[in-house]
Amino acid sequence: MATIDPEKPIPQHVAVIMDGNGRWAKARGLPRRDGHRAGAESVEACLESCGEAGIKFLTLYAFSSENWKRPESEVSALMNLLAHFIKEKTSKLMKNNIRLKVIGQMHRLPDKTQKLLRKSIDKLDGNDGLTLIVALSYGSREEIVDAARSLMDKAVAGEMKSEDLTNEIFSDHLYTAGIPDPDLLVRTSGEFRISNFLLWQISYSEIHITDVLWPDFRSEHLNAAIEDYQKRQRRFGGLSEEV
Ligand code: IPE
Ligand code: IPE
Ligand code: MG
């Protein structure tokens, strides 16, 4: 049983690559969309567990730029599920003082989904508890190129000089502007890869990979990830205190 050490810091920002919905469904002889539906329940459970643990930012990788390559039927099942989740859960998010943000190329989502998301984001805007950041039609390379493009536009317009560009200014042009970098990155279903997620932001994140499939992910698994994080010694390229 994982136990979080109250004496040690907990991650302020946890980012999760929610993977394994398809395998979960396959193992049960169910269609992939049933795995995604079960995955939505894990999202709700994870939000509650993060709230209890005192985590301030939770980023969930829900749909990647590359996921548009999946069959139309799966993409539309995912979009419908997302719309349903937003419609059904916004009032619960409100009650739990959760703020919502979306990162990614939102304009690629169906109009209906974009409208629902904007309405929900506006409604939850004044909340100051956990910030839930959902990565939708998100790709880190696209994000970096979008940032580079807006910086180039500024340079061409004479609003900035190339020699004035810093890491901080670059960060401020990413979709995640204003959000601290993740302290802990979790990937479910045992794959050891990043899949175009937050490449810039995870430079010094601690990584926890679990074999648990996303639809099975519950508070005990989040707590195990936090416990693992608490054992790490973060050095950011410097020397540890004991050296
Ligand atoms: C993660 O589960 C959800 C999304 C990528 C939308 P997958 O659908 O990738 O599930 P697996 O990896 O095929 O098991
Ligand atoms: C990453 O999972 C994207 C999300 C969890 C939304 P994928 O299943 O798309 O990643 P790969 O294809 O295994 O790298
Ligand atoms: Mg997958």
Image: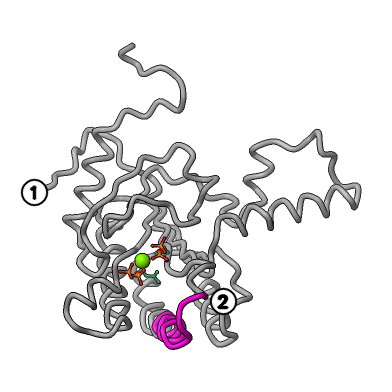
Residue at disc 2, secondary structure: helix
In the image, what residue occupies the spot 56% across and 76% down?
118
Q: Which residue is mark 1?
A: 1
The spot of residue 33 in percent (x, y) is 32, 83
Q: Residue at x 29, y 58 (%)?
A: 188
Report helix, strand or loop for mark 1. Answer: loop
> What residue does disc 2 label?
118
Q: Ligand 3, what quadrant?
A: bottom left
Q: How is the image coloured?
A: one colour
In this view, the residue in front, 153 or 68, is 68
Q: Quadrant of residue 12?
A: top left
User: Disc 2 versus disc 1: distance between alpha carbons?
Assistant: 40 Å
Dots 2, 1 in contact, CB < 8 A:
no
Front position in the image: 8 or 19: 19
Q: Which residues are magenta?
A: 69-83
Disc 1 crowd, CA 10 A, few/some/many (<14, 14-19, 20+) = few
In the rendered image, the residue lying farthest to the top is 243
- Residue 144 lies in magenta, yes or no? no
- Which is nearer the eye, 110 or 190? 190
Question: With respect to residue 181, does 166 lie above or below?
Answer: above
User: Where residue 124 sits in the image (x, y, percent)?
Assistant: 48, 70
**Where 62 falls versus 156 (above or below)?**
below
The residue under label 2 is which amino acid type?
Arg
The residue sitting at 51% across, 75% down in the picture is 69
Say left or right for 240 vs 127: left
The yes-or-no answer for disc 1 within 8 Å of ligand 1 is no
Where residue 4 sits: x, y (%)? 19, 43
Tell me the amino acid under the disc marked 1: Met
Is 74 part of what is drawn in magenta? yes
